[in-house]
Amino acid sequence: MRILLVEDDPLVSDAIVRGLATAGYVVDAVTDAESVQGRLDTAHYDLAIVDLGLPGEDGFSLVRRLRRDGSPLPLLIVTARDGLDDRVNALDLGADDYLVKPFALPELAARCRALIRRATAAAANEMVVGQLRIDLAGRRAIDNNGRVLELTRREWSILECLAHHSGRVVSKERLIQAIVSWDEEISGNAIEVHVSRLRAKLGEAATVRGIRGLGYRLDDA
Amino acid sequence: MSSNPTRAPSIRGRLLGYLLLPLVLLLIASIWADHRTYVTPMYDMFDRALSHAAVSIASHVQKAPDGHLYVERQDPGPPLLHGPGHGPLPPPPGDEPFAKDRPPERFDPEYRPMSWMRLYSGARESFVYRVSMADGSTLAGDESLPIAVGEIIDNLTYGDVHHRGLLFRTASYHTIVAGAPIIVTVGETVHRRDTVVRRLDTVVGLSDGIQLLLVFGVCMFGITVALRPINRLRDQITRREPSSLQPLPLEPVPGEVRPLVKSLNTLLVTVRDSTLAQQHFLTNAAHQLRTPLTGLKAQLEVLASETRDSAQQERISRLQGSVDRLAHTANQLLALARAEPSAHGPGDSVEIQLGTLIEAVVGSMLDRALAHDIDLGAECEAAQVHGVYWLLHELLINLVDNAIRHTPRGGNITLRCGLHQNAPYLEVEDSGPGIPPAERERVRERFYRAAGSDGQSSGLGLAIVEEIARSHRARFEILDAREGTGARMRITFPGP
């Protein structure tokens, strides 16, 4: 997996390059927005990490330009600003995620993994969460032992919905909407039953974490 | 403008007050002037009528063959239309000065010669006469009627006398009949004359009063119309968001108020500029603080992963702790600065579902809670507030962060929202040791750190909560947990 880093601070840039290398990524670093296009023309990247506060053309402008040119490249914004306006703005412009400085490298690596996973899922119809491989086209899940899990229609729908938002909390209402058609009715308790059965079938491959009062989150382990 | 701000008189009231007083004085002066203008000719007219009566009576004084003077008597004869055979007499007219002109019906030929029936219509008991000789003897009429004394003009003198308990205006005509000087005195009560003047006064007063009322009404209308732009300006100002910094429009504002609006706009622009400058400064400060911290933090992490020496690992880990604390404090200071009302504009306020806010905060704090083996959960009921989203997000993050710091492993933290007596509230309850009532005020102070708190705390978390709550006109309370020993932090927003 190849990542393009656009960051002007040498200390930050160097640490990200080395930190992500440990996580198994190849990172090319540039210091300004102007050199981005040249890199994109010569190599294929799975993700770009863009700092908003760049000298010259800033990160907002770069994101806007890339999206206007129709680039499907997943974009992760890192910024020192924390006002929500910036966040909404960056996401509206077409960035895929947002991380506020100072961040921990594992956090950055996790975000990169999630973004790349999502992009790959869209392209290859397959997602990997923890040790679980989810084949979206075949509507089946394969665990770490290569065994295809036997899931009911509703359990599959729950897993699919959670996998699409893996690492994020999915509310019970949203799960209900995902698994039933408009004329069916299902209670919150029924969801709990389905989830606990799914949990048992997943075993060690991935964890469905219950968040009291809110919903569920699919975690790697 | 009045120097006394407590009375705050309205411009309209003052204008009307200053107009009404002179107008009333003008009315009184004009009635008085009119009265003076007509009263003298009116009196002259009455005097002339009296003198005509006197002259007319004098022409009826004749000399008898025996040399004595007497007043010729006239038989009035039957009335033309009234009397026997012509139905009853009409009722006597009142003492009306403007009554229809006609002769008196009850006419006493003994004392009131027919002649002044023509001369002086309407004369009755209010009319007296006396024909006297130069020696004071009375030839005819009322002996007790005094002769008018004074300057003789055209053989006439005039006077005001009291006679039979009434005030009379008298005229005495000095003449010579058959060689003998006589004085014919006629008198009339002033009642008729006064009634006429009074009537005129009333009519003049009424017409002047109506004019005044009309003028006053026109003034009221004029003032109302003239003040309309000012009222519009007032409405515009009261309709605005209280914290709006948009300049006021200059267009419908009259010239007198324009400098006021201009200086207000200057002030608004200054405030807005300083807000923008502060926001700009904070953005720069955030960038300048966070970027090197990010580098430092990330470099230490890389260093830690590359080092095999356990003593160095230990040192790096301590450095990381310090850098994390520094980063935390920098974040808190920036958050505190951003929470100040001058650092965010009124346009940042939106309608916020508290449930959505809690979902977002739980989502971002979940990993920290799990790392501390804490069960982070929520109990949400529908509640909505008007506020700055990222500030309330920051507030809740700080409350949860604070709760995580004070909750032991295996504990739980519950976020709640809903309506309490129609007022939306946010609540964060933990299963920690709680905060003793004596400390509850002090923990809100900046940089206050409770005894036994860990080294990571900046002592700013609850100060930020306090500041953000205040900027949303919300109340921040520290309460006991509903169950167990923990603390319950509650933010109550103003009701609808």
Image (cartoon, coloured by chain):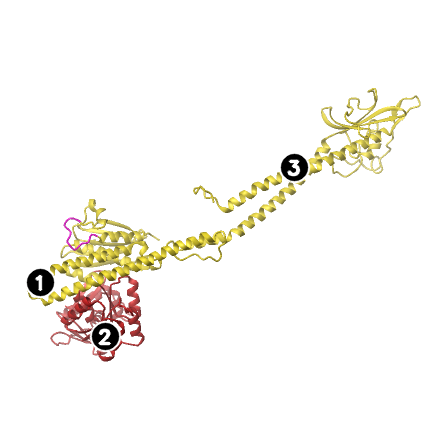
Q: CA distance from mark 3 to mark 1?
A: 111 Å
**Residue farthest bottom in this picture:** A42
Residue closer to the observer: B61 or A156: B61
User: Mark 1 or mark 3, which is nearer the start of the sequence?
Assistant: 3
Q: Quadrant of residue A62?
A: bottom left
- The amino acid pointed to by label 1 is Gln
Q: Secondary structure at mark 3?
A: helix
Residue B453 on the magenta segment = yes
Q: Marks 2 and 1: same chain?
A: no
Residue on which the image places disc 2? A119
Residue B200 location (% of width, % of height) = 69, 38
Judge by depth and name the residue closer to the eye, A151 or B282.
B282
Image side of residue B100 versus residue B496, left or right: right
Residue beneath the point at 22% across and 63% down: B291
Q: Nearer the viewer, mark 3 or mark 1?
A: 1
User: The residue under label 2 is which amino acid type?
Assistant: Ala
In-image side of B70 versus B257 (left or right): right
The chain ID associated with circle 3 is B
Kind of residue at disc 3: Trp
The chain drawn in red is A
Q: Mark 3 vs mark 1: tell me if same chain.
A: yes
The chain painted yellow is B
Give the labeled residue for mark 1.
Answer: B313
Q: CA distance from mark 2 to mark 3?
A: 101 Å
Instruction: Give neighbour class at mark 3: few <14, some 14-19, many 20+ (Cα, 10 Å).
Output: some
Mark-to-mark CA distance, 2 and 1: 37 Å
Bounds of the magenta span? B450-459
Q: Which residue is mark 3?
A: B32
